[in-house]
Image (tube, grey):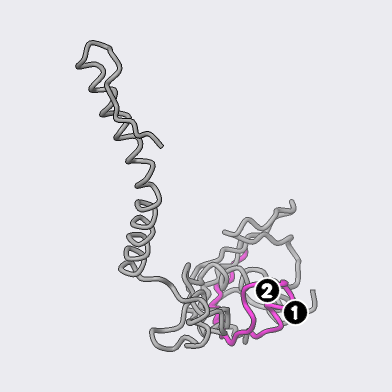
């Protein structure tokens, strides 16, 4: 991946002890990972690294913002990013897959690639609901995707019920008449109740 080296820490010649690194994250990182959510961004990555013979301990902080589609109006929306984590990097002769919690390097490997870790950390730090602050959504888009309030929904539901009641009224009247007739028949000892007839 072309962006790998932009977010890598070179280990060759790096002595044991404390070291600091800074990276700027932009659209190229999100494009490289084929992000469908993040359209753009401007983030700063600060890495405080403690190196020893056995491992590296990276304290990572990511701050800035990314641009995503607003869940309410679908227009571009800036979401702030503020992420902090510690990433252990261990050395092993055996190859290990990155598990999201720690990295593994073969002794003598010359750099630590943080591109995937930075990308995943930004994605995971996004809030579940991504919306503009109140009053900043595109009013035209809100009209198209207007959300019905609870009161409006209750009113619509009541009108629908009233309409259905009118449609069913004729059927209910027939059933009520049938019930009354059967009750009269039972009272008369099972004999059919007399009904009025009209001659044409």
The picture places residue 131, in percent across and down from the top left corner, at 47, 78
Q: Residue furthest left?
A: 187
**Of the residues under marks 1 and 2, which one precedes in the sequence?**
1
Q: Is residue 77 left or right of residue 166?
A: right
Are dots 1 and 2 in contact, CB under 8 Å? yes
Compared with 51, 139 (above or below) is below
Considering depth in this image, is 111 or 176 the residue closer to the camera? 176
**How many tags in the picture?**
2
Q: Is residue 57 above or below residue 77?
A: above
Identify the residue shown where x is 35% and y is 51%.
Answer: 165
Residue 53, percent from left and from top: 62, 64
Instruction: Please give the residue where the numbered disc 1 appears in the rendered image.
Output: 3
Q: Is residue 195 left or right of residue 6?
A: left
The answer to if 197 sits in the magenta stretch is: no
At 40% from the left and 51% from the top, the residue drawn is: 167
Q: CA distance from mark 1 to mark 2?
A: 7 Å
Residue 115 figure quarter: bottom right
| 62 to the left or right of 23 | left
Q: Residue at x 55, y 71 (%)?
A: 58
Residue position for label 2:
115
* The N terminus: image quadrant: bottom right
Q: Which residues are magenta?
A: 26-53
């Amino acid at each position: 991946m072309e962006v790998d080296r932009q977010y890598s820490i070179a280990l060759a010649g790096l002595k044991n002890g404390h070291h600091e690194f800074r990276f700027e994250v932009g659209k190229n990182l999100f494009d490289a990972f084929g992000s469908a959510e993040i359209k753009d961004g401007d983030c700063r990555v600060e890495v405080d690294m403690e190196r020893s013979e056995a491992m590296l301990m990276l304290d990572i902080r990511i701050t800035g913002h990314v641009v995503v589609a607003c869940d309410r109006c679908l227009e571009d929306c800036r979401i702030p990013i503020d992420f902090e984590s510690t990433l252990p990097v261990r050395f092993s002769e055996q190859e290990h897959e990155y598990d999201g919690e720690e990295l593994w390097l073969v002794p003598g490997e010359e750099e630590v690639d943080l591109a995937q870790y930075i990308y995943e950390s930004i994605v995971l730090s996004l809030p579940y609901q991504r919306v503009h602050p109140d009053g900043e959504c595109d009013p035209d888009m809100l009209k198209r995707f207007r959300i019905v309030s609870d009161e409006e929904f209750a009113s619509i539901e009541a009108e629908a019920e009233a309409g259905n009641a009118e449609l069913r009224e004729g059927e209910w009247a027939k059933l009520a008449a049938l019930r009354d007739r059967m009750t009269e028949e039972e009272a008369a000892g099972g004999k059919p109740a007399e009904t009025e007839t009209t001659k044409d």
